[in-house]
Amino acid sequence: MNIETIQVVKQLLDSPKKIVVVGHKNPDGDAIGSCLGLYFFLKKLGHGVTVLMPNDFPDFLKWMPGCETIIIHEKETDKSAVTISDASVIFTLDFNSLSRIGDVREQLEKSNAQFVMIDHHQQPDNYAVAMYSDTAMSSTAEMVFHFMDALDGLSYLDSEIATNLYTGIMTDTGSFRFPSTTATTHRVVARLIESGAKNSSIHQNIYDTNSPNRMRLLGVALKNLTILPEYSTAYIVLSQKELDDNNFKKGDTEGFVNYALSIKGIIFAVIFIENKQDNIVKMSLRSKGDFSVNEFARTHYHGGGHTNAAGGRSSHSLNTTITDFISILPAYKNALT
């Protein structure tokens, strides 16, 4: 954080405020962990704080400290509207465009609150009076740690904050294996463990709670794997019927795309997931090296994210989306090979 941003934030927080902390639609471990970590920190500073998510999040995250306090907008629309209306400061975490929060966007755009952004995605929008944006960071959860440090607040670290921030960092770095994991990330993680984060238990809570249905769905996904060696690309397809047949629950496909990326010689991987309720095909894109799935998703699929991890969507049918995707690849052959 630069000095100017720190000064603005300190002025905003110089007296008790009603604060809302907002995460993105379809929240993941980093969104939940960073928001709840900040929630406990701001409460210790004497503020009235509420965490709000646009929609529900996977069961494997619902053990996290403080998650029972989160307002889910799609379930409590009126309460969400009142909470936002009453806020004088709104923190937006793990997203940098209001297009990422679904129906909550309309409420935020009506708000007279001052906005603070903490985020590590590329190409941020300009809606906040204080913007802490750093695309080199491993996760927004790591950024919340540095945010606390900039406010001389690391003395407030406790097991609840540490557990949430550790979870956010661990999940967004693929258990510390992605290139964004730096020496500083590991030093932060060490401090979180010293402050009460039980790393082994957190890992078990996230990764060792697979349901039989999820494992069967993974089998279907791997059976549907297609490899395009001429483009160093692999993709997985899951239809709505396949999801329904395996009693799909939110979060069940988390990490599936990484199986495609783990294949020898593959540097670009995508999973296509049909969502008939929203009439879209959801996409998760991953890459190795310098191939930017952020730019690919922004150019072709109304999405974005990071260089090596991004999301997108298509309003076409599942078959048309896949056909179109394959037709796009020749334009990227040099970059992919």
Image: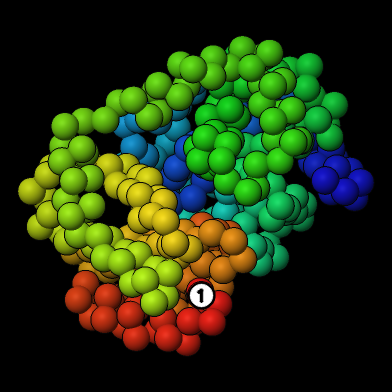
Residue depicted at x 40% and y 28%: 206
Instruction: Inspect the image, locate mark 1, and give the three-letter code of the amino acid beneath it.
Output: Thr
Taking the image as shown, residue 317 lies to the left or right of residue 306, namely left
Q: Nearer the viewer, residue 48 or 246?
A: 246
The vertical placement of 57 against 294, above or below, is above
How many callouts does the rendering have?
1
> Disc 1 marks which residue?
337
Left or right position of 54 against 88: left
Assess disc 1: are there few (<14), some (14-19) or many (≥20) residues with their C-alpha within 10 Å of its C-alpha. Answer: few
Tell me the quarter of the picture where residue 191 sits. top right
Left or right of 304, for residue 41: right
In the rendering, at what x and y percent does residue 30 appear? 53, 40
- Up-down relation of residue 157 to residue 331 (above or below): above
**Vertical position of residue 78 compared to residue 322: above or below:** above
Figure quadrant of residue 78: top left
Give how far across and how far down residue 4 sits, in percent.
90, 50
Q: Nearer the viewer, residue 269 or 118?
A: 269
Question: What residue is shown at x 66% (from left), y 26% (from top)?
Answer: 189
Residue drawn at (41%, 51%), measured in percent from left and top?
A: 262
As helix, strand or loop, the secondary structure at mark 1 comes to loop
Q: Residue at x 26, y 81 (%)?
A: 323
